[in-house]
Amino acid sequence: MELTNNYNKAVAIPPLFILVLMVSVGPFGDTEYTPSLPSITRDLGVAYSTTQLTMTVYLFGYGISELFYGPLSDRYGRKPIMLIGAAIFIIGSVVCLTSYSIDQLLAGRLVQALGSCAGGVISSAAIRDAFPEDQRAKVFAKRDAAFALAPGLGPIVGSFVDHWFGWHINFLILVILAIILLISVWRFFPETNITPNKDALNYRSLFRNYYFILKDPYFLPYLIVVGLCIGVVYSCLIEAPALVVNILKLTSNWFAAVAGAIVFSFIAGSIVCSLLSNRVSDNLIIMAGLFTMLVGSLLLGLFAKLDNITFVTILFPIMIIFVGVALAVPPAMANALIPFKNITGSASAMMGFIQFVIAGLSTIGISALHDGATTAMPLTFSILSILAIIVFVGFVIARPGRERKTA
């Protein structure tokens, strides 16, 4: 299937299944191994807080690589850079699969992150390359449905894999998926960047774009809010398995119920967000989401304080928190990107870098607070929610009407 672009040359349209595969394998791999964290801790003979750092290094690696895949694919083409990213993901997954020390596992997770980031960045660029403007929203919506489900399905699969086969098999699954991705991209993904930009890696233009983006009065505040919300998500994924296995003394496959509840809550929150978007302002929706997160965090803290920790008293507050995350994140991300129509790629790259670095810092925080009891999760969630509210109120709500230059 072909269309004619502005350069009057035929651009092959990539199949939807390839775009979905590219954007979902990485997020699935983000979270699939998280139910195995208690098993990894036991088998490698390290502290649980050390095992949690496998997520921290992944988030930092993912965030940093966000800044480079876009410009590299602008310069050398989408397909070769995507193939390199898939190959790096395979190498990282093999390193994790063969890990019998925490140092090797940490290294493998970092390499995984450097490869898995390519899918999201390059699939977005390919959609902008190949599809007319009036079709892009529909394609993005279909692709992003898979992107939203993948990190939620990861722990559901991973919990059963850990229970029946052991934690190494999680990474064997990722090796297989990464190989399928590599072969599929090589065989079915057409090159959509038919006019490579030789100046795409010019450091002056890159820094000029990033400087312009960061000068915007609202970009950073919105992105800090998003990063803190994403921090709640990943902090939950690395701390909840310890509560389920070590505190409640349940098997790891029970974490599938937690992951399922998270997916359900996120979908419910997204539906509410969509229904409200045409009726109330985005800032009001964001504020409602942040306060919903705080209410869920405080409720979880109350149950911990009363020493009333059961599966239900963990699950119910977590569901409230994730409804809040789903309310706050989409409008915050959309508002952050409003002025940058002509440099959307650079703005998206900076957005990914900021949100994943903040999320990585959040996981460091919960690892530092981890004491083998029940206080780390509600305390971390409450701190992140309060910080998000302070940033949002102080730098967005309290400073309305500031000029946002477009680019």
Image: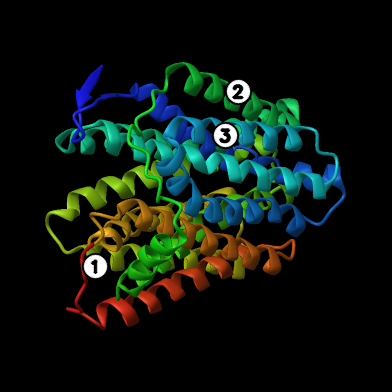
Residue 310 visible, this orientation: no
Q: Which residue is mark 1?
A: 283
Residue 369 vertical placement versus 128 (above, below): below
Real-space Cα separation, disc 2 to disc 3, in angstroms: 12 Å
Quarter of the picture containing the N terminus is top left
Q: Which residue is mark 3?
A: 84
Across and down, in percent, residue 181 comes to 53, 25
Query: Which amino acid type is shown beneath numbered disc 1?
Result: Asn
From the viewer's side, name the closer residue of 385 and 126.
126
Residue 314 vertical placement versus 164 (above, below): below
Q: In the rendered structure, find residue 176 and report the number of the disc placed on it.
A: none
Quadrant location of residue 288?
Answer: bottom left
Residue 342 vertical placement versus 116 (above, below): below
Q: Identify which residue is drawn at 41% across, 24% down.
A: 18
Across and down, in percent, residue 162 comes to 70, 32
Q: Identify which residue is drawn at 42% across, 64% down.
A: 204
Quarter of the picture containing the C terminus is bottom left
Q: In the rendered structure, find residue 179 and report the number of the disc placed on it.
A: 2
